[in-house]
Image (cartoon, rainbow, N blue to C red):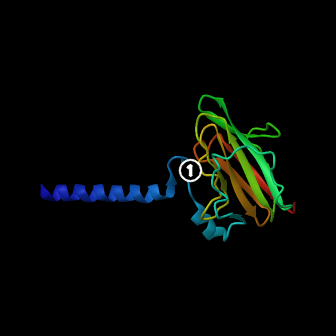
């Protein structure tokens, strides 16, 4: 009887260990697998480097201002919004074009800011899939709020972006092109 209890305990500990290992590599809220370390091992450093010092944090309490990128001539600003197309189905919307899940063109070697308005009743988080260990992210953008993501791509290429909470319906591509 003690042997069966010990065997059952070993099996249970093994299952819990496997769950712990897999949960460390999965993003449960976004239902997506983080494969940045694998991509880095296969392809080396990512050509997109996220900005640091708080520039990737969501600015949920910032007010709308008409000045977008007057501080530097080597800056690029893109406006996105979120929209609930039907109950529970959300999409990114190009604020200037109205395009659903738009392809974003970003110049290489330029500070780029993606400003996001969230008029919906749920939170969103914009993530750029660069293959780096730390992915550029807007952090959570709460309902009826706004946020932003700042980054500087250092070479040309195509990347995808998605919402951490709605990765199957809120996704698009970013094309990094030469020069501003």
Residue ID at (78%, 40%)? 95
Residue ID at (62%, 42%)? 168
Percent coordinates x, y for residue 162 in the rendering: 65, 48
User: What residue is pinned by disc 1?
Assistant: 32
Taking the image as shown, residue 161 lies to the left or right of residue 103, namely left
Residue density around tag 1, few if under 14, some if 14–19, many if 20 or more, within 10 Å: some
Out of 134 and 35, give the one closest to the viewer.
134
Q: Look at the image and tell me whether residue 105 can be seen.
A: no
Q: Quadrant of the N terminus?
A: bottom left
Which of the 4 quarters of the picture holds residue 44?
bottom right
Percent coordinates x, y for residue 146 in the rendering: 67, 44
Taking the image as shown, residue 92 lies to the left or right of residue 176, namely left
Residue ID at (69%, 54%)? 149
Where disc 1 sits, the SS reads strand
Residue sticking out furthest to the top: 86
Q: Look at the image and tell me whether residue 53 can be seen.
A: yes
* 1 w.r.t. 170: above or below: below
* 151 w.r.t. 145: above or below: below
* 52 w.r.t. 100: above or below: below
Out of 2 and 23, give the one closest to the viewer.
23
């Amino acid at each position: 009887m003690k042997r069966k209890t010990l065997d059952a305990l070993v099996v249970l500990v093994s299952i819990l260990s496997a769950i712990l290992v897999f949960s460390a590599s999965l993003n449960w809220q976004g239902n997506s697998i983080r494969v940045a370390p694998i991509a880095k091992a296969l392809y080396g450093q990512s050509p997109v480097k996220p900005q640091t010092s708080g520039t990737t944090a969501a600015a949920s309490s910032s007010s709308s201002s008409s000045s977008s990128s007057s501080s530097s001539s080597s800056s690029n600003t893109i406006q996105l919004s979120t929209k609930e197309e039907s109950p529970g189905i959300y999409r990114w919307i190009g604020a200037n074009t109205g395009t659903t899940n738009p392809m974003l063109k970003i110049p290489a070697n330029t500070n780029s800011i993606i400003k996001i308005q969230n008029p919906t009743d749920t939170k969103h988080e914009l993530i750029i899939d660069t293959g780096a260990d730390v992915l550029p992210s807007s952090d959570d953008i709460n309902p009826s709020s706004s946020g932003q993501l700042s980054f500087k791509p250092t070479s040309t290429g195509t990347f995808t972006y998605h919402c951490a909470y709605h990765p199957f319906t809120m996704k698009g591509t970013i094309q990094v092109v030469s020069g501003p």
